[in-house]
Image (tube, rainbow, N blue to C red):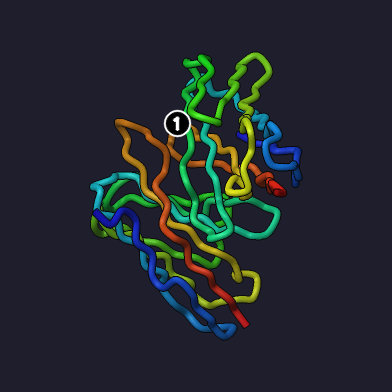
Amino acid sequence: NAGVTQTPKFQVLKTGQSMTLQCAQDMNHEYMSWYRQDPGMGLRLIHYSVGAGITDQGEVPNGYNVSRSTTEDFPLRLLSAAPSQTSVYFCASSYEADRLGAFFGQGTRLTVV
Amino acid sequence: AQKVTQAQTEISVVEKEDVTLDCVYETRDTTYYLFWYKQPPSGELVFLIRRNSFDEQNEISGRYSWNFQKSTSSFNFTITASQVVDSAVYFCAFEDSSYKLIFGSGTRLLVRP
């Protein structure tokens, strides 16, 4: 049981490049979400999904796209990377009935130069 | 709008001291969940506790205890007899009815030997 798996763990991008952060969970959780963590600001919600085929914006969605074609996967796409997107990104999943609290991936540290 | 405030940015204690981390939230919802997470220096997010808005019973788990007071919108976390391994950033979070987590900015706890 791997839980929530994020890849890659580290990434350096040049301004303007695009990339996809991968997130997969094997717990059959309906709810998945992406957060970014910046120093002194806690975690802020980027996008979330309440099930396959359904996504919605969080607090800071600009510059990011998501899709949810399967229950297991919830990739986050940076369309044209900017230095302001330098951050640590966390993917999380939750199970509706138990609401045990979100299960978080290990995080992806992204630097945009 | 929902909001979580952790007024203590950083706390430093000597090992074996008790320490309380404060969390105050704002919401108009009647049904919600509150969480505490720990983020050790390694960077992962560790779920500590969940409490729903209908359960004001305080809880003790080993050296950890939580004090939920709906009347003051507070959900404080106490570590008894702190240890060096408790050094981490602690986040309080609020979950609304759509399963979105809203985090406070975190409290950095440093336990000195």
- The spot of residue B8 in percent (x, y) is 75, 40
Residue at 37% x, 33% y is A99
Residue in front for this viewpoint, B24 or A65? B24
Above or below, B42 against B100 in this view is below
Residue at 50% x, 41% y is B101
Secondary structure at badge 1 equals loop
Q: Which residue is mark 1?
A: B97
Identify the subunit bearing mark 1: B
- The spot of residue B89 in percent (x, y) is 62, 49
Residue at 23% x, 57% y is A70
Q: Is residue A26 left or right of residue A39?
A: left
Residue in front for this viewpoint, A16 or B57? B57
Q: Is residue A64 left or right of residue B70?
A: left
Residue in front for this viewpoint, B83 or B39? B83
Camera sees residue A49: no
- The spot of residue B4 in percent (x, y) is 64, 36
Residue in front for this viewpoint, A77 or A7? A7
